[in-house]
Amino acid sequence: MEANELTEMKVYRLVFDPQTNSPIVILQDEGSGALMPIWIGIFEAHSIAMKMEGVETSRPLTHDLLSNTFSTINGMVERIEVVDLVDNTYFARIYFQVSNKSYSLDSRPSDAIALALRTASPIFVANHVLERSKIDPSEIGDMDGEEGASEEDQWTRVLKNYNPEGSKEKLN
């Protein structure tokens, strides 16, 4: 994909789906503020959270092991890209170099994001994916008038009606 077909994103936060209690990683376009949630597994959420919070482990987690492997073979993760969304499933690719040769691997977005955090590699989302699945930050916005409403309450309200395929109709 060409750079103009991609938007660079940052990991904004981890939240839990209010209905399934599944973890969700929220990516953010720092330019527009657009947010994009991706439902992930509990182990990947744990790995992402540990890196975000700067928690060191005595033994490497899987994503640490992969990062250490790249380092040992003088490889470099160039970037990760969330490249598609099909039937509510996101697809990603990890782009890396070893010995001046470029490679890419298919990946779950959660694993790619966990690796990108460990290697300080940029995270990109294909614009067609972002357009279909983004949340406008004003939807989270301020909930004045709702006494005691926390940011978690705001996310609960938004995610109850979120459909990653682009429709704001409630998922059942």
Image (spheres, rainbow, N blue to C red):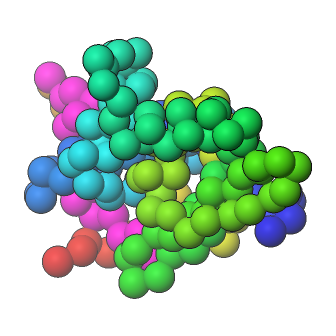
Is residue 29 in view from this perspective?
no
154 drawn magenta: yes
Residues 76 and 47: in front is 76
Residues 28 and 92: in front is 92
Give the residue furthest to the bottom: 87
Q: Quadrant of the N terminus?
A: bottom right
Q: Quadrant of the C terminus?
A: bottom left
Residue 26 appears left or right of 3:
left
164 drawn magenta: yes
**Magenta stretch, residue numbers:** 148-166
Dividing the picture into quadrants, the one containing residue 54 is top left
- Residue at 37 percent across and 43 percent down: it is 62
**Residue 122, above or below 147:** below
- Residue at 51 percent across and 51 percent down: it is 112
Picture coordinates of residue 68, whole percent (x, y): 53, 33
**Residue 151, above or below 132:** above
- Residue at 42 percent across and 24 percent down: it is 52
Give the residue furthest to the front: 73
Picture coordinates of residue 116, whole percent (x, y): 57, 40
Residue 43 appears left or right of 167:
left
